[in-house]
Image: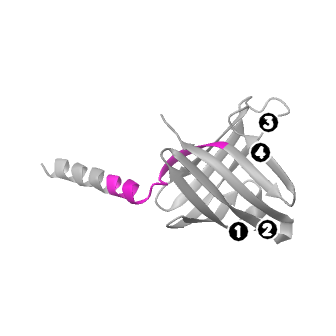
């Protein structure tokens, strides 16, 4: 009996967290738009590559790879993550891990908008020491099993 009550309590706690934080879950990146100065680059992440972002109550992680298993000129693999803060629509990432190590230790301030199963995250990415000054717009859909 006590085990059954414990399971019900755990399940209800998980449901409460998801309701209060709609970011929790796995998201698949569909498109990314980078604006640098007067140049705009739009990338379709559904062609030849796949990127997911996994968010729990305290951390985020992202993984991207090519769909050719790294055997041709499109070979790519990117992984990173860290902690985040969420206050309303303000989403702040504290990047602790990235295979491009010089990006580690930076903080990025974004705004988010969730409509149904779509997440749009946008904001500035500025790292003066690397010459990075860009506005990033990412459109995700909630991943399904």
Q: Work out which residue is located at the far left of the displayed protein and give it.
A: 1
Q: Which residues are magenta?
A: 14-30
Name the residue tied to disc 2: 127
Cα–Cα gap, marks 4 and 1:
24 Å
Q: Residue at x 77, y 45 (%)?
A: 42
For marks 4 and 1 on the same chain, the one whose residue lies earlier in the sequence: 4
As drawn, the label of residue 75 is 3
Asked whether the residues under the numbered discs 4 and 3 touch, taking CB atoms below 8 Å apart as contact, a structural biologist would say no
SS for callout 3: loop
For marks 4 and 3 on the same chain, the one whose residue lies earlier in the sequence: 4
Asked whether the residues under the numbered discs 2 and 3 touch, taking CB atoms below 8 Å apart as contact, a structural biologist would say no
Q: Residue at x 75, y 60 (%)?
A: 135
Residue 124 at x, y percent in the picture: 72, 64
For marks 2 and 3 on the same chain, the one whose residue lies earlier in the sequence: 3
For marks 2 and 4 on the same chain, the one whose residue lies earlier in the sequence: 4
Cα–Cα gap, marks 1 and 3:
26 Å
Q: Quadrant of residue 122?
A: bottom right
Residue 142 at x, y percent in the picture: 52, 43
As drawn, the label of residue 106 is 1
Above or below, comparing residue 140 to residue 107 in the picture: above
Q: Quadrant of residue 35?
A: bottom right
The label nearer to you, 2 versus 4, is 4
Name the residue tied to disc 4: 42
Asked whether the residues under the numbered discs 1 and 2 touch, taking CB atoms below 8 Å apart as contact, a structural biologist would say yes
Residue 48 colored in magenta in the image: no
């Amino acid at each position: 009996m006590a085990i059954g009550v414990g399971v019900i309590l755990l399940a209800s706690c998980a449901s409460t967290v998801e309701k209060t934080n709609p970011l929790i879950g796995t998201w698949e990146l569909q498109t990314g738009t980078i604006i640098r100065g007067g140049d705009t680059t739009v990338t379709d992440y559904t062609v030849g590559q796949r990127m997911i972002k996994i968010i729990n109550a305290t951390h985020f992680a992202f993984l991207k790879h090519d769909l050719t298993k790294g055997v041709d000129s499109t070979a790519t693999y990117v992984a990173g993550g860290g902690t985040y803060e969420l206050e309303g629509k303000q989403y702040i990432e504290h990047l602790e891990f990235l295979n491009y190590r010089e990006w580690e230790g930076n903080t990025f301030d974004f705004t988010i908008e969730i409509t149904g199963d779509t997440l749009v995250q946008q904001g500035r990415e500025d790292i003066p020491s690397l010459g990075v000054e860009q506005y990033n717009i990412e459109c995700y859909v909630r991943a399904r099993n």
